[in-house]
Image (spheres, rainbow, N blue to C red):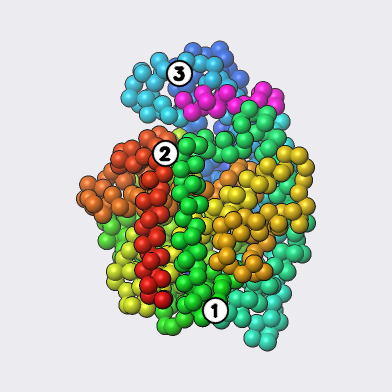
Amino acid sequence: MSAPESVLPRWDMTPFYPSLDSPEFAAAYAQMERMIQEMTAFVDTLDSLETNDGLRELIARQSAFAEVGGVVGSYVGCIVEADTRDTAAAARMSQIDLLFATTSQQQARITAWIGTRDIEPFLAESEANAQYSYMLRKRKTQALHQMSPAEENLASELGLTGASAWGKLRGDVESQMLVPIVLNGEAKQIPMSAIRNLVTDADREVRRTAYEAELAGWKTVETPIAAALNSIKGQVNTLTKRRHWDSPLAQSVFQNQIDQETLDAMIGAARESMPHFRRYLGAKARALGIEKLAFYDIFAPLPGESRVWEWDDATKFVAEQFHGYSARMGEFAERSFRENWTDAGPREGKVGGAFCAGVRGDESRILMNYQPAFNNVSTLAHELGHGYHNLCMSKMPILLQSSPSTLAETASIFCETVIRQAGVKAGSPADKLAILEASLQGATQIVVDITSRYLFEQSVFDARVSRELSVDEIKAAMLQAQDDTYGDALLPEARHPYMWAAKPHYYSTGSFYNYPYMFGMLFALGLYARYEQDPDGFKSMYDDLLASTGMADAATLASRFGIDTRSPEFWRASIGTIVKDIDTFEGIVG
C-alpha cells in the first residue's frame, strides 16, 4: 500500500512562475513567441551571411531562446503530467507544441545550411567556438539525412496531428483510466497506475487479482492503443526511408551517440547472460514458495520481515548515501528535498512511472508514484541522478547542456548503485537480502525485460513496413519477445501480453527508447568499478564526464576511463558483477 497522499510531497513550481495564468508566465510566453518570429526572419537571411558571422549569430539567438523556451515548455509539461485532466494546461501545451513545430522547421533549415558550409575555420577561430565542434559536426551529418525544406516543414506540422497526437492519446487514456477491481471483498475503481503498483503487494492473491484487472483494463482500450502504436511506427518508418537512414535503429544509434558495433556488443553480451537471470528468477520462485513465477510475481517482496521505507526514511537515506559519495552530491539531494522538487504520490489524473525534468539552470523537477519499498527508494535515487547530471551540465553553454539517453541513464543508474552498495553494507541481514533482491529485480528489468522490448520493437518496425498489425499480432509479438528472454523462468500462461500498452516509451516520436537504459546501467557499473579503484581521482573526472555529454560521443567519453564500449568483454564484465549477486542470492535462498 502506498503512503497516504497527505504525507507525500507535491512539487513546488512557483519558483518559475506563480501560476499558469500569472502575468509573469504571460510575459515569458509572449517573449518566447517573439523570439520564434525573430528567428524565422533571421533564418531567411542565412544564405546571405558569411559562415562565421552566421554561426556566431545562430548560437547567440538559439542560446537566448533556449533560456526562455526551455523553462516555459518544461513548466507547462510538468503541470500536464501531474494532472492530465487540467484542461487549461493541456490547451496551453497544445499551443506550445505548435510553436515548437515552428522551431523544428527552423532547425531543419539551419541544419541544411550548416551542411553546405565549411565550419572548420569557425571552430579554429577560438576556444569558445571550438567547444561547439561535436554539436556542429553532428549537424553536418544530420544534414545528409534531411528531406527538402518543404518536406521537413510539412513533416513537422503533420507530426502534431500524427505521432505526437497518438502518443498524447495513449498517455491520456492510461492516466484517466479507472480500473474495476475487487480487493478484500470490496469492489472499487482505481487508476491504472495504482493497479500496476499492486505488483509489489506481499499477498499473491492481491497481485494475481491486480494482474487480471490490469489485463482486463487494457483489453477495453486495446484498439485505440494499437492504432497509436501502428501509426507512430508507421510514421517513423516512412520518415526514416525519406531521410535515407538504413533503418529506425540506425537513426536511433546515431541520436544516442553510440555506434552499431557498440550496440551489437552490448546486446550480444545481454543475450548470452539470460540463463543467469533465469537462475535468479528460479531462486526467487523458491523463496516465494512457488514452483515458477508468474509475471505478477516478478516484483513480489520476499517473505519475512523487511524494512518499510516511508518517504522521510527514503529521503534521509538517499541524502546520507549521496553525502558518502561526495559533499556536492549530498548537498544537491538535500536541496531538492528542501525546495520540494518532487511530486511523489500516485493519484487520479497523474501519469504513471517516474521522470526527472530539467527546468532551469541547475533546477529540476521529479515525478514519482512512490511506494514504501526499497525499489522506490532506488527510483528516487535514479531520478535524482538525472537531476545531478543537470547540475553538472548547468555551467556549460546552454546549447551544450544535452545528453543522449545512453549517457543520461548512466548518471541515474550510477546513483542507484551508490545507495544499493550502502544499503547492503549497512542494513540488517533481512534488509541486505531485500536490497539485494531489489537490485536484482532492477537488473533483470534492464537486461532481460529491456532486451525483450528491444526485440519486440524491432519486430514491430519490421512488420509495419508492409502493413498495420492487428491487436492479436502485437500481443503475439510481445509474448514471443518475453519467451525469447525470460524463457522457462515464467509460467507460459501468466506472461504479460499487454506490456506494449503499459510502457509509454513505445509511443515517443523517436524509436528504440529501451536499450539506452541497458547501456546506462552497464556503463555505470563499469564506472563504479573505476570509482572503487580510485575514489578521490574518480569524482572530478566523473563530474567532468557528465558536464561533457553534449560535447562528445559515448566511446570518446568512455575512453577517458580506459573503457572500450565496442568490446564485448567490457559488457560481459559489467554483467559479471550482477552474476555475482545472483550467485549470492541463489546461495542464500538455496
Which numbered tag is attached to residue 520? none
Confirm whether the magenta stretch covers residue 138. yes
Indicate the position of residue 102 as horizontal and vertical percent values: 64, 33
> Which label lies toward us, 1 or 3?
1
Indicate the position of residue 566 as horizontal and vertical percent values: 42, 39
Say what secondary structure mark 1 lies in: loop
Q: Earlier in the sequence, mark 1 or mark 3?
A: 3
**Identity of the residue furthest to the bottom in this view:** 185
Please provide the residue range marked out in magenta: 137-151
User: Which amino acid type is marked by label 2?
Assistant: Arg
User: Which amino acid type is marked by label 3?
Assistant: Ile
Q: Residue at x 64, y 64 (%)?
A: 496
190 or 534: nearer the eye? 534
Q: Residue at x 62, y 35 (%)?
A: 247
Say what secondary structure mark 3 lies in: loop
Disc 2 to disc 1, how far (Cα)? 41 Å
Disc 3 to disc 2, how far (Cα)? 29 Å
Q: On the picture, is 502 further left or further right than 133?
A: right
Residue, disc 1? 290
Q: Residue at x 63, y 76 (%)?
A: 208
Residue 5 versus residue 572 in the image, above or below: below
Residue, disc 3? 119
Residue 368 versus residue 429 in the image, above or below: above
Say what secondary structure mark 2 lies in: loop
Whether residue 403 appears in this view of the structure is yes
Residue 19 versus residue 8 in the image, above or below: above
Residue, disc 2? 566
In the figure, residue 568 lies in which quadrant? top left
Whether residue 380 appears in this view of the structure is no
Q: Quadrant of the C terminus?
A: bottom left
